[in-house]
Image (tube, rainbow, N blue to C red):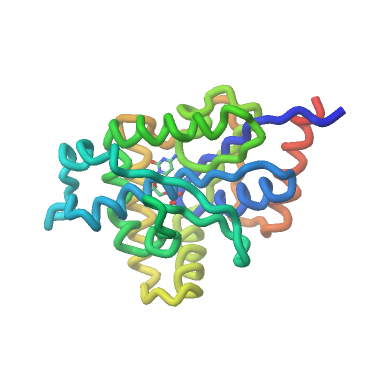
């Protein structure tokens, strides 16, 4: 008999390595992977491109809400680079949604309740058939409170800034450690203090502090947790 299909919710701080773990787990066990952060980033890119951000870096909230029906987000399955690409109204925006301009504006966009409820509804639809790994901030608490396996990933802000800097430099972005560190700390602050679905560990989530772990150790740890639940 096949093992039962489950929902895996992986939440945690920005640049904690949760997306890498989630993507790799999905690949190994043949599940669908959804990067919910990419969806908030795509909405932010739409806002930047459509003049919905004020010069003082605040969001034109009412206007953005009125334009939400125009925003369609989908994913294209992994191509040659092995990475799933995010599409905004059919356009591949995988690269644009990762740049600093989007990173700096995504948290203020993600605090808007109407943005959240629209994206949460889409995320819940993806999970209807189970067999999904989704990562984000509120997956175990709000999107799938009944997920069979919930992981909460953390590591120090210094370690996470170092990882993000490495990633960005590899992609050819010109940023400094200080800029990245400030962005990490500021996003932690906004993500944990916002009113709707703040980032917090679900009471039934298993915590993983991966600051001192290699990627291989993290995967072994995660696969074991997955097998414990699916074999029950
Ligand atoms: O995981 P990430 O860094 O790509 O996420 C980008 C931003 O999106 C993050 O600063 C907070 C927001 N986010 C959220 O509010 N809820 C989620 N489920 C996922 C991301």
Residue at 62%, 51% in the rendered image:
23
Q: Residue furthest top?
A: 146
- In the picture, the quarter occupied by the N terminus is top right
Residue at 56%, 49% in the rendered image:
18
Report x, y in % for residue 22: 61, 47
Q: Residue furthest front?
A: 90
Task: Compare residues 11 and 156 and report the one nearer the observer.
Answer: 11
Residue at 66%, 56% in the rendered image:
213
Whether residue 99 is situated above or below residue 143 in the rendered picture: below
Report x, y in % for residue 227: 78, 36
Whether residue 223 is situated above or below residue 20 in the rendered picture: above
Q: Residue furthest right?
A: 1
- In the picture, the quarter occupied by the C terminus is top right
Q: Tell how many labels.
A: 0
Task: Compare residues 185 and 57 and report the one nearer the observer.
Answer: 57
Tell whether 171 sits left or right of 227: left
Whether residue 102 is situated above or below residue 145 in the rendered picture: below
Q: Residue furthest left?
A: 55
Residue at 51%, 56% in the rendered image:
85
Ligand 1 shows up in the quarter that is top left
Report x, y in % for residue 8: 62, 35
Tell whether 56 sits left or right of 81: left
Tell whether 69 sits left or right of 26: left
Report x, y in % for residue 4: 76, 28
């Amino acid at each position: 008999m096949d093992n039962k299909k489950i929902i895996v919710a992986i939440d945690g701080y920005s640049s904690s390595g949760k997306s890498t773990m989630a993507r790799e787990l999905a690949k190994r066990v043949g599940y669908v992977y959804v990067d919910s952060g990419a969806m908030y980033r795509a909405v932010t890119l739409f806002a930047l491109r459509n003049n919905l951000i004020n010069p003082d870096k605040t969001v034109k909230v009412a206007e953005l809400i009125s334009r939400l029906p125009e925003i369609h987000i989908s994913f294209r399955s992994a191509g040659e680079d092995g990475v799933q690409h995010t599409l905004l109204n059919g356009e591949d925006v995988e690269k644009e949604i990762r740049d600093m301009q989007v990173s700096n504006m995504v948290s203020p966009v993600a605090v808007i309740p109407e943005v959240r409820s629209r994206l949460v509804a889409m995320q819940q639809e993806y999970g209807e058939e189970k067999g999904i790994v989704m990562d984000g901030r509120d997956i175990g608490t709000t999107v799938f409170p009944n997920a069979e396996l919930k992981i909460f990933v953390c590591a120090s802000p210094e370690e996470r800034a170092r990882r993000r800097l490495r990633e960005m430099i590899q992609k050819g972005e010109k940023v400094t450690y200080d800029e990245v560190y400030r962005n990490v700390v500021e996003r932690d602050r906004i993500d944990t203090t916002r009113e709707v679905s703040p980032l917090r560990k679900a009471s039934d989530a298993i915590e993983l502090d991966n600051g001192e772990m290699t990627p291989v150790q993290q995967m072994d740890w995660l696969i074991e947790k997955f097998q414990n639940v699916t074999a029950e």
